Structure formats: structure tokens, C-alpha cells
Image: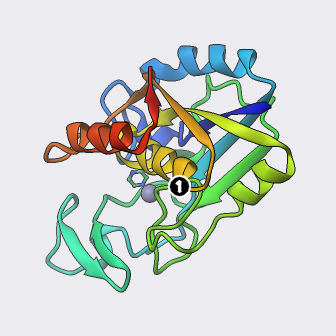
Amino acid sequence: MEEALIVIDVQNDFCPGGALAVAEGDAIVPLVNDLIRRFDHVVLTQDWHPEGHSSFASQHPGKNPFETVTMAYGEQTLWPDHCVQGSEGAAFHPALEWTKAELVIRKGFRKRIDSYSAFFENDHKTPTGLAGYLRERGISQVTLAGLATDFCVAYSALDAVRSGFTATVMMEACRAIDLGGSLDAMTERMKAAGVRLI
Ligand code: VGL
Ligand code: ZN
């Protein structure tokens, strides 16, 4: 039974000084590097939006970051412009030891749809291909760490379980945005779904 570490969005824009900075986002980097050393298989995700992405508040006149809108696929939180393809903000944190990674899954590259999860976009239907990749590689267990706990990490963990993988989240190696109680809410959803939180 093979296991993979999935490192979620350890990118400059989610670290202090970045466009969508997560408090202490950079503090997890040494812990994530330790995990990378310990796992045989490492996959990274990279939030990767085209300019003018529909999840950016700047594209919705009269709306501010962290407000919500209804998209074709349901409710969507609006964000500051972040992780624009090819920008410094979209690059991995400079101290992240990513060279060992076997795969980088980019997500959020379709202009009309956001993607928090490493497995499915926010319509919960459009696959990223990660489940197929892991299955073909004989990987049935995933461990997750990264940013942000209550968005991309949580949705990835929930979709991992839904896709038939066992999922563990290393909570110390994650940091949250925590918008309107989202950390508690998503922690409860993960527990209820059978995600192991350690
Ligand atoms: C994320 C909001 C927007 C994340 C990505 O990585 O958790 N959150 N894009
Ligand atoms: Zn994003």
C-alpha cells in the first residue's frame, strides 16, 4: 500500500507579505520540508489563476474581497487578486524543498471556475486528474499539509475520502484563513467525513 504526501499551495501569496497572506503561513515550511523528506511520494499543488480570474473581487464591481457571489456552480467567496500565473506570488515559498516532488497539480486555471480542492474544481464535478494519477501509481493513502487549512487543504481532504483514499491532515503543518468561523466548520466536516486529523 503506497502513500503520498500532498503539499497544498505553499506559495508566496499565501505567506506573510503576499496578496492573500495566511497568518504564519510561512511557519509551516520547516515542518513541510521534514514531511517531504519522510515520504516516498510527494505531490505539490499550485494555485494558478489567469489574470482577471472570476474568483477575484476585482472582477465583480461593487464587491470586496471576502464577500461572496453566486456563480453558475454555487456560492463562491471572492478573494484579492492572487497566484496569477507566472507571478512571483504564485511561486513556491523560496524555502520549500520541492525538488523531490513527482507531480505538480495546478488548479484554478479556468477563468470561470475556482478550484480549492486538489481533486475537483469548485463545481465538485470537474476532475483535476489527481485521483487517476494516484490510482495508477498504486497510491491509496494520502497525507496533506499546507495552506489554507480551511479552504484548499480541507476541500482536498474531503475529496480524497470521497474518491476512495484514506486521508490524514497534519494540522500543525497547516495554517488557516479562518473566515467567519470557517476553520471550526471545516474541521468538523473533515472529522465527520472520516479524515484523520493529527
Ligand atoms: C486558497 C483561497 C483562494 C487556498 C486558494 O489555497 O486555500 N484559498 N485560493
Ligand atoms: Zn486561489
Q: Which residue occupies the extreme bottom position in the image?
A: 72
Classify the position of the N terminus by image quarter.
top right
Task: Specify the quadrant of the image occupied by residue 75.
Answer: bottom left
Position of residue 20 measured from the top left corner of the image (x, y, whole percent): 35, 46
Classify the position of the C terminus by image quarter.
top left
Q: Nearer the viewer, residue 143 or 44?
A: 143
Q: Quadrant of ligand 2?
A: bottom left
Residue 21 in sight here: no
Position of residue 106 measured from the top left corner of the image (x, y, whole percent): 64, 57
Position of residue 194 measured from the top left corner of the image (x, y, whole percent): 44, 39
Give the answer, above or below, for where 96 lies relative to 20.
Answer: above
Q: Residue at x 51, y 49 (%)?
A: 156
Q: In the image, is the residue at mark 1 within 8 Å of ligand 1 by its beta carbon?
A: no
In the image, taking residue 159 as reference, residue 42 lies left or right, namely right
Q: Which residue is mark 1?
A: 162
Task: Specify the quadrant of the image occupied by residue 141.
Answer: top right
